[in-house]
Image: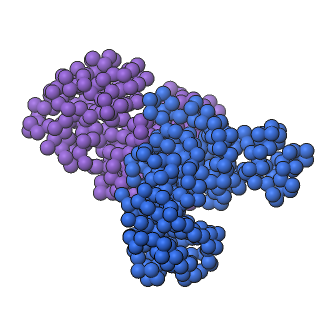
Chain colours: A purple, B blue
Amino acid sequence: MMYIGIDLGGINTAAGLVSDSGEISSKRSVPTPRTPEAVADAIAEHVKNLLELSDGSVKYIGVGSPGAIDPGNGVIEYWANLGFNNVPLGRMIEERTGLPVIIENDAACAALGEFRSGAGKGVSSLLAVTLGTGVGGGAVLDGKLYTGINHASLEIGHLVIEHNGRPCTCGRKGCFEAYCSATALIKEARKAMDLCPDSLLWKLAGSKENVNGKVVFDAFEAEDPAAVKVVEEYISYLGCGITNLVNVFQPDVVCIGGGVSGAGETLLSPVRRILDSEDYARGCKKRARLVQAELGNDAGIIGAALLGVN
Amino acid sequence: MMYIGIDLGGINTAAGLVSDSGEISSKRSVPTPRTPEAVADAIAEHVKNLLELSDGSVKYIGVGSPGAIDPGNGVIEYWANLGFNNVPLGRMIEERTGLPVIIENDAACAALGEFRSGAGKGVSSLLAVTLGTGVGGGAVLDGKLYTGINHASLEIGHLVIEHNGRPCTCGRKGCFEAYCSATALIKEARKAMDLCPDSLLWKLAGSKENVNGKVVFDAFEAEDPAAVKVVEEYISYLGCGITNLVNVFQPDVVCIGGGVSGAGETLLSPVRRILDSEDYARGCKKRARLVQAELGNDAGIIGAALLGVN
C-alpha cells in the first residue's frame, strides 16, 4: 500500500509518495499559492503527478497544515499566514482527486513522521520540538498521535518559562518561543552586535540583516565573547524548556528539529547536561533521550502520509 | 465485580471497596506504619476487613503510592518520605492476601479516579492538578492513563515558570510548585504578616504558625490588603501554570484538587479569566474546562481500585 503526504507550508507545498514503512519514493515541491482554490489545485496537481509514479495502490491523501484544523470535517478553521477561515480543504481536494483526504496539524504530522521512521523508530513515546521561526511541538504518546480535544495541543512555544518576561506574539509574556525560536536567537545576536562593534558576528554575517542561527553558532564555536553570551543564555532557556517538557511527558525520546537544531551536539550536549541535573526522574532507570531530529523537512510529508496507518 | 483500592500516603493509608462504576461501598483508614513489612501488614489487614464486607467478587488490589514506582515489577523504587528503596510491595501484599496487586503512582491514581467517576466522567481527556504540600498532577489522555516511560510523568509541580526564580526542593529554580503549592501560599502569607502587623491575617490565624490556605482566602474575601496582595500574586502564577498545561494538553477538563482548591470559585474564576485571555486555543470551538475536583481524598482510592479496568 502507498500513501500521498502533503506538507502545506506558508512558503512551499511539498508532496511525497510514501510507503507503509515511511519511505519516500518520490517528492515534489511548489510555491504555495495564496487562495484556497489555488492551493487545492496545486495539491491536486501534485497528486496527479505522484499517482502516475505509483503502483496504483494509493489509499488516501494525508495533509499537514498550519493553523487551527478540524480533521473531523477536513476544514482549516483558521490560518493567519494565508488568511484562511473555515476552508473545507479536505472536500476540495477530494473533489479534485477522487481520493479520501485526512487533514491534521503540521507539527503533529512532523512528530508522527519522526516517530514512524525517524528519531522515534521503535520507541513508544516521542516528543518533537521544532526550533524555527517559532517553537513548535508534537507528541506521539504510547504509540498514538496526541492532539487534544481541538487539535491545538502541544503549543509548547507558548509555555511561559519567565513569568511576565519577554512579550510573545501570542499575547502572553515570557513564552518559551520568545527565548528559544531562531527568531529570538537572531534578535539577541543583533542586540549583541550593537553592543560589541568588534564582535566576530559582524565579520561572519557581514551585516546585522544577514545574521542567522548558523552564524551565531559559528561565532560561539570560535569563542567570540558576544556570541558566547548570546548562546549561553539561549541554551539556559532551552534547557529550562526541554526539562519542563520531560518532567511533563517522560517520553522515550525528545527530538529537536528546525533550523537551530543544525548546530547539532554543540547545542544538544549542554542542554543534555541541564536535563541530566534537573530532570525530576534523573534517578530513574529509564530516562528520556534527547536527540536531533532525523528527517528534516521530510518529517511532515511522511507523518501526513501515515496519518491513517495504525 | 469489585476491587480494593489502597491510597498509601505519608500519614495515612486508606482503603476502599470499589465497584466497576467507581463507587466506594466501604472505606477504612489507619496511620501509615514506618517499615515496608508493617506497611504490607497494614494493607493486608485492610484487605482482610474489606473482603469480609465484599460479595466475594474482588478481582485484585490496586495501590497508589508516592515516589518512583515500577508497576511492571510491583516495586516502590524510591520513596523519600519513608526512606523506601526498592521495596517489592506488590509481592509482599500478594503473599499476605493471595490476591493480584497492581501498583501505580498516587497522583496518576487520583487522576484516573476523577476521570472515571468525578470531574472527568464522560469526557475523553482529563488533567488533574493538586495544590497541596506540593503541586502534583496526573493525566488521562484519549481515555488512557498516561504515565510516561518511567511512571514519573506529569511532575507538573516541577515546571519552571520563572527562570532562575524561587528555589525548589527538586533543585531547580522557579518551579510552579515554589509559587502555587499550599506551602508556598502560606510562606508568602507569613512574610506579609511580618510586613503588616495590622493585617487581618493575624486576627484570623492567631499566630503565624496557624496560617493555612483557608485563613488566607478568608482574609482575601474580607479585602485585607496584605491577603489581597498575596492571593493576587498566587493567582497570577497559578493562571500562568494552568495556561501552560492547557497549551500542552488541550484536555476536555482540568480539575483542581488539594487543600487550596477548597477556595472554590474565589480561586477558579480569576484563574479562568487568565486562561480565557491567554489560552492559545481561545478562538477554538472546543476549549478545556477548568473545574474543581469532585472526589477529594477518595480519588486516589477509586483510581487505584480501577487501575486494571479498561
Residue nearest the observer in this picture, A153 or B171? A153
Q: Nearer the viewer, residue A247 or B44?
A: B44
Where is residue B8? Give x, y as percent.
56, 69
- Residue A214 vs A47, above or below: the answer is below
The structure residue drawn at horizontal position 18% and vertical position 44%, both measured from the top left corner, is A19
The residue nearer to you, when weighing A233 against B181, is B181
Q: Is residue B208 above or below residue A23?
A: below
Q: Residue furthest left?
A: A55
Q: Where's residue A308, x and y in %?
A: 24, 42
Q: Residue furthest right?
A: B198
From this viewpoint, is residue B223 visible?
yes
Q: Quadrant of residue A188?
A: top right
B260 lies above or below A287:
above
Can residue A294 be seen in this snapshot? no
Residue at 33% of width from left, 49% of height from top?
A144
Across the whole image, how many numbered discs are drawn on residues? 0
Q: Image point 15% across, 27% down: which residue?
A: A98
Q: Residue at x 33, y 17 (%)?
A: A34
Left or right, B207 with reference to B235: right
> Can you give x and y, in whole percent of width and height, for residue A201 in the image?
53, 36
Q: Quadrant of the N terminus of chain A?
A: top left
Vertical placement of A220 versus A9: above or below?
A: below
Instruction: Tell me where residue A153 appears, x and y as whole percent.
Output: 44, 40
Q: Quadrant of residue B58?
A: bottom left
Of residues A83 and B264, which is closer to you in this image? B264
